[in-house]
Image (tube, rainbow, N blue to C red):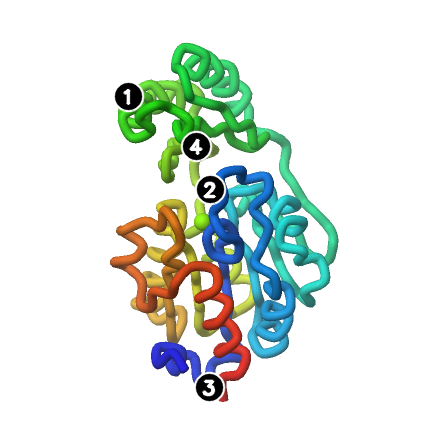
Amino acid sequence: MTPELRRLSGLLGRTLVALDFDGVLSPIVPDPASAVALPGTADVLTAVAARVARVAVVTGRPAADAVRLGSLAGVPGLVVLGHYGLQRWSDGTLSTPASDDGVEVARRRVAELAAARPGVTVEDKHHSVALHTRSAADPAAALAELRPHADAVASEAGLQVTPGRFVLELRPVGVDKGVAIRSLVAETGAAAILYAGDDLGDLPAVTAVRELASSGAIDAGLVVCSDAKEASAELRAAADVVVPGPPGVQELLSELAALD
Ligand SMILES: [Mg+2]
């Protein structure tokens, strides 16, 4: 038994379990389109869902992608927040807002930035646009060179730049995993949170968990770092528990489902 899970003893029925998808439920693979969840994921989430107030997946991906890649459609009561909380899937129903005007502006400018830089690619996520440098000769140098240009486009379009591993994502202001966590706590009345992530995009969620705990809005917060390939050093340092990637997350969730 992971000792830190004891923090949730007595609070399990009022616990929100919120999980990132990539690097947490699914191993990081070269092609994000084939990042399927680890076998057994839906089963363990179903076991956890029977014990806690709510299981949620909070991802930068479109919500339907995570449901499909995770084979999660049958997990009872599951909520999947896509696009960092902009989009919501539950009970087989997807609610999605219209695309932001700023994203429309940025889409064209970002395509120009990529066209001028070998190895830089655009991912159009509809509610955001992302520039990837993974395929550049020097991905880190390409990212650093690109950053001020992406900042300028975001500023012009009224968006914010969210950096990740070899990616800069331009998306609407006021949408992040921290906001998503706060909304899940508000709607469930959760008294405790277990959050698991692996990337820079998870840090706002960690901040939200810490602030909710220190303000007394929740009684316990537990942050888990899935130490997957390319995990963020900041997240690792901020976490209460570090587990070895998606298999470690799955083991921890099994322990949670079996907690007294
Ligand atoms: Mg991730």
Residue type, mark 1 in image? Glu
Q: Are marks 3 and 1 in contact (CB under 8 Å)?
A: no
- The first of marks 4 and 3 along the sequence is 3
According to the picture, the residue beneath numbered tag 3 turns out to be 10
- The first of marks 4 and 2 along the sequence is 4
According to the picture, the residue beneath numbered tag 4 turns out to be 169
- The first of marks 3 and 1 along the sequence is 3
State which mark lies toward you, 4 or 2. Answer: 4
Marks 2/3: CA–CA distance:
32 Å
According to the picture, the residue beneath numbered tag 2 turns out to be 175
Q: Position of residue 228 (x, y in %)?
A: 40, 54
Residue type, mark 2 in image? Val
- The first of marks 2 and 3 along the sequence is 3
Q: Callout 1: few (<14), some (14-19), or many (20+) C-alpha neighbours within 10 Å? A: few
- The first of marks 1 and 2 along the sequence is 1
Compared across the picture, whether 142 is left or right of 194 comes to left
The quadrant in which the N terminus is found is bottom left
Point out which mark residue 74 bears. none
Q: Position of residue 171 (x, y in %)?
A: 47, 32
According to the picture, the residue beneath numbered tag 1 turns out to be 145
| SS class, disc 4 | strand
| SS class, disc 2 | loop
Q: Is mark 2 within 8 Å of ligand 1?
A: no
Marks 3/1: CA–CA distance:
50 Å
Q: Position of residue 148 (x, y in %)?
A: 29, 21
Q: Are marks 1 and 2 in contact (CB under 8 Å)?
A: no
State which mark lies toward you, 4 or 3. Answer: 4
- The first of marks 1 and 4 along the sequence is 1
